[in-house]
Structures are given as structure tokens and as C-alpha cells.
Image: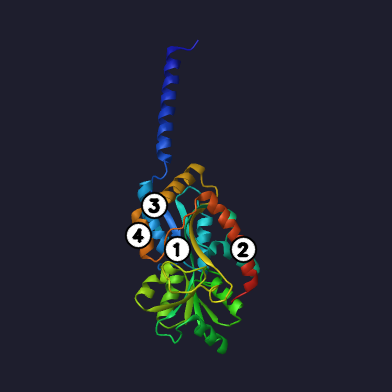
Amino acid sequence: MTTRREALAMMGAAAAAGGFSRAALAQDAYPNHPISMLVPFPPGGVADTVGRPVAEAMGRFLKQSIVVENKGGAGGGIGIAQVAKAKPDGYSTLMALSSIVVLPEADKVLARAPMYQLNQFKPIARFTADPTVLVVRADSPWKSFQEFIAHARQNPGQLTFGSSGNYGTMHVPMEQLKIATKTFMVHVPYTGAGPAILALLSGQVDALSTGPASVAQHIKSGKVRALAHWGEGRLAALPDVPSLTELGVPVTYSQWSGLFVPAGTPAPVVEQLRQAARETVNDPRAKQAMVSAGTSFLYQDTPEFERFVQADAKAMAEVVKAIGKVN
């Protein structure tokens, strides 16, 4: 028989265990401290322009701050690789651009060890997807796409274009354009869209292709001129700018932004981030921030975004092979 003393001891142990369990659950509640959102580019680019209002809105929904951290380099590869290796606990998130699916393929073409693999990530949500826009300085001699390409053909190797890095979202569309128009322009890579745009404005490069959100203010202020875009039809934000397909150049390219976490992040945490992302695209403040930046939300929820990422990775693998090795 169990003695009274043994019974009391067992009851005390059970109570202590119950108290510990409740404390452990409270401690493990997500999120219980600030979340990091790494933007793998310097400030001023599309990922940063989208990431900051998204982080603010998601933080309000989760009742915990989301801190944006910029870490540029290698066309976004350095920051992306950092998150790939991070602890899968929901406190390390990544606001990536479409270059995330390109860089592993570029590593294959260059016969080097990949900085990361796509299967190291769990896609959460896509927020935007905009065609890139070809822009030049407003004081340049080219008033139209036709004039720009004519100059490139007549002066091979003289025109320069900036980008956020080799095989990045600003580089790939320009390589597509070069192949389609049989022109040779010199690529000048920078650490992100922000530095590349500053290079254009200061006259260090002649042109670049980037998402509307990163140059909208410069187009409005009259500092740069948009000549064409890589979409289909006209863009609501730039109704007077023709598409390349409209101009007889059969290339398209979309620079999308999306939220990722390391693979292995617990399903309940993924679900909370998914819900926060869904709430964000309906948040008035976040929507207005997108409109002010010259873009808008084009949301994909987790299952659809996962399929989209896989399909885009397959398509971009062929583009990278066509581009081949670059310096």
C-alpha cells in the first residue's frame, strides 16, 4: 500500500511537473522576442522597399517587433545563405527577391560550390511581382527604347548597365535583352539596387533594369526616364511605358518578392507567419506604402507560392544556361 507520505510526495511531484509544463509552454509561445527579417541587399532596393512596411504590419499582427536587417553581397547570396543556416525557430526570416531561385543555378554554371540550396527554405508568402523597367538618366540622349538599342548596336561595348550583382534580378533581364537584340553592353555589378541606382544617377553607368518600386520616385521627380518594361501590356504605375513584347522584343521577366524561413521551422510557427502575411496584404497602411512606392501587393499564400517558386526555378535554370558564364 502507498503510505500517506508517499501519496503526498507523488501529488507534489505531479503539481511541480504540471507547473513546469505550463511554464515551459509559456516560455515557448511564439513569438516571445523580436523577429529578424533579413533583406539580402543594401537599403533602397525592392526587397528593402517591400520588406519594411511588411515587417511593420506583420509585427503588429504578431504583437512582436520584426527588425529588418540589410546584408548585401554576391547578388543577395551572402544574406540568403545566412538565413539558410539559421536556427529554424521562426525568429530568422528572409525577404528575398526572385534571384533566390537563380543563384544556385549560377553556381552550377560557374562550377563552384553553391552558397545555398532552395530546399533549405520554406516559402511563406509572395508579396509583389513586378516586371523590371529599363531606365536611363533624364539628361541622356535616348528618348525611346528604339534610340537606346540603335546606339547600343552602333557602339558595341560602349554602353554600361548597373545591377545588384551577377545573376541577380537586375542582371538577368539585361542579359535577356542583350541576347534578344544581339547587342553588347558592359555589365557593372554593385552590392544592391540602391548603390546601382546611385551609380546611374551620378553618371557611372548608362542604364539599368530594376523593379518599379526602386525607381518610382526618381521617375516622378524627372531624374530618370523609363524606356520599356519586361511585362506584358501596360503597367498601371507607368501607363506610357511600352513593354518589350509590344516593341517586338520577345522577352519577359518578373522581379518578385517573398518571405521565407529555414526549412524545418515548426508547422505552428509557419502557420502564424502565414496568417500574419495574409493580414498584411489587407492592411491599409501597408497597402498605401506599396502604392506610394509604385507597386502593389500581388499575394500568393504558402501552397501556391511553393508551386510558383519551383516553377520559376525551373524556368530560370534555362535562362541562366543561356546566359552562361559571366565575370
Q: Is residue 112 visible?
A: no
Would you name the residue on which mark 4 appears?
288
Identity, as a three-letter code, of the amino acid under mark 1: Ala
Q: Residue at x 44, y 65 (%)?
A: 46
Looking at this view, name the residue that lies furthest to the bottom.
154
Mark 1 falls on what kind of element?
helix
Instruction: Residue 76 in the image: state x and y as whole percent.
Output: 50, 65
Q: Earlier in the sequence, mark 4 or mark 2?
A: 4
Q: Label 4 to label 2, Cα distance in Å? A: 32 Å
Instruction: Residue 54 in the image: state x and y as whole percent.
Output: 40, 56
- Residue 282's tag is 3
Which tag is nearer the camera, tag 3 or tag 1? 3
Q: Label 3 to label 2, Cα distance in Å? A: 30 Å
Mark 4 falls on what kind of element?
helix
Identity, as a three-letter code, of the amino acid under mark 4: Gln
Q: Is residue 291 above or below residue 190?
A: above
Mark 2 falls on what kind of element?
helix
Q: Residue at x 62, y 69 (%)?
A: 320
Q: Label 3 to label 1, Cα distance in Å? A: 19 Å
Would you name the residue on which mark 1 appears?
47
In what quadrant of the picture does the C terminus appear?
bottom right
Mark 3 falls on what kind of element?
loop
Identity, as a three-letter code, of the amino acid under mark 2: Ala
Instruction: Residue 191 in the image: state x and y as whole percent.
Output: 47, 71
Instruction: Residue 45 in the image: state x and y as whole percent.
Output: 43, 68
Residues marked 4 and 1 touching at CB (< 8 Å): no
Residues marked 3 and 1 touching at CB (< 8 Å): no
Q: Earlier in the sequence, mark 3 or mark 2?
A: 3
Would you name the residue on which mark 2 appears?
315
Q: Is residue 205 left or right of residue 64?
A: right
